[in-house]
Amino acid sequence: MKTWETKSGYKITRVLAGRSNVFLVASSDKYFLVDTGPGSRWKTLDRRLQRLGIKRFDALVLTHAHFDHAGSAARLQGKYKAKVIAHIAEKPFLAKGENNAIGGTNALTRLVVAGLGKHFVRRARYEPCRPDIQVDPSFDLREFGFKAYALHTPGHTAGSLSVIVDDEIALVGDAMFGIFPGSVFPPYAMDARELVKSWGKLLAAKCRLFLPAHGTANSRMLVQKDYDKRKRKCRE
């Protein structure tokens, strides 16, 4: 399990990788989780949390309501007594265990969405979950004892959130990917222009590192370079 640390001593551990990354943020004896991975990986996630000695944690922030990010939210809410935090726009999908539809951002993914999009929305269901805290537009996690906050970063979905930890590291969900060489642009998004605007918000937060839900960490230099390039295109 890979770990990052801020200058103030906050530790961010990737407790689950593969289909979707799940991050545990720790400060002393306090913890919160960002995303859950798909429900099919519940046993692995639960086992790894137990291996870390986690019996209970304060909050679960869902970056958005897709099955590979919220699939185990109800189980975590029940077993670990975590307060589930999500943007208000994601609530209807979480309440039904449904995926909000997205579009492709390139020719290939647009074809995939056109052919399989409705099938995906129907088939990729998960156990419903009712958020305890609905974010609009941001939420300060100091309430739970953390120097961190959830920030509305729409684009992938209308209610996507990112989490800024200690003004250093951003956990960005699907606002960025860490898979493609030289680019952080996701292959799927509801609104690509809004997505690029959200990168601007994340860069304004002065973070040095961006941890996506898919792939590896992105440097500030890479994000800034991609942002500058795509911002120009959005103006055309």
Image (spheres, rainbow, N blue to C red):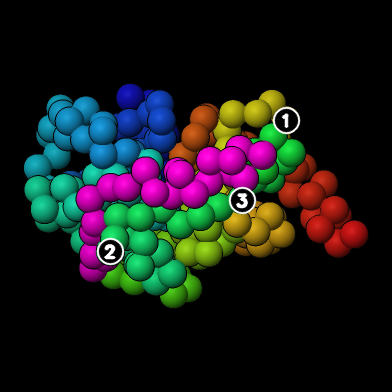
SS state under label 1: loop
Q: Nearer the viewer, mark 1 or mark 3?
A: 3
Magenta stretch in the rendered image: 111-132
What residue sits right under mark 1 in the picture? 182
Q: Residue at x 41, y 30 (%)?
A: 19
Quarter holding the C terminus is bottom right
What residue sits right under mark 3 in the picture? 103
Q: Residue at x 46, y 44 (%)?
A: 119
Q: Residue at x 53, y 64 (%)?
A: 158
- In magenta stretch: residue 73: no
Is residue 207 something one can see in this rendering?
no
- In magenta stretch: residue 128: yes
Is residue 130 something one can see in this rendering?
yes
Q: Residue at x 60, y 56 (%)?
A: 190
The amino acid sitting under disc 1 is: Gly
- Looking at the picture, does residue 123 appear above or below residue 2? below
- Looking at the picture, does residue 202 appear above or below residue 188? below
User: Crowdedness of circle 3 by 10 Å Cα count: few (<14), some, many (20+)?
Assistant: many
Q: Going from the N terminus, do you reach mark 2 or mark 1 first?
A: 2
What residue sits right under mark 2 in the picture? 95
Coordinates of residue 95 in the picture (x, y in percent): 28, 64
Q: Which mark is residue 85?
A: none
Q: Going from the N terminus, do you reach mark 1 or mark 3 first?
A: 3
Q: Is residue 227 left or right of residue 209?
A: right
Q: Quadrant of residue 193?
A: bottom right
SS state under label 3: strand
Gap between marks 2 and 1, in whole Å?
37 Å
Coordinates of residue 147 in the picture (x, y in percent): 37, 59
The amino acid sitting under disc 2 is: Ala
The amino acid sitting under disc 3 is: Gly
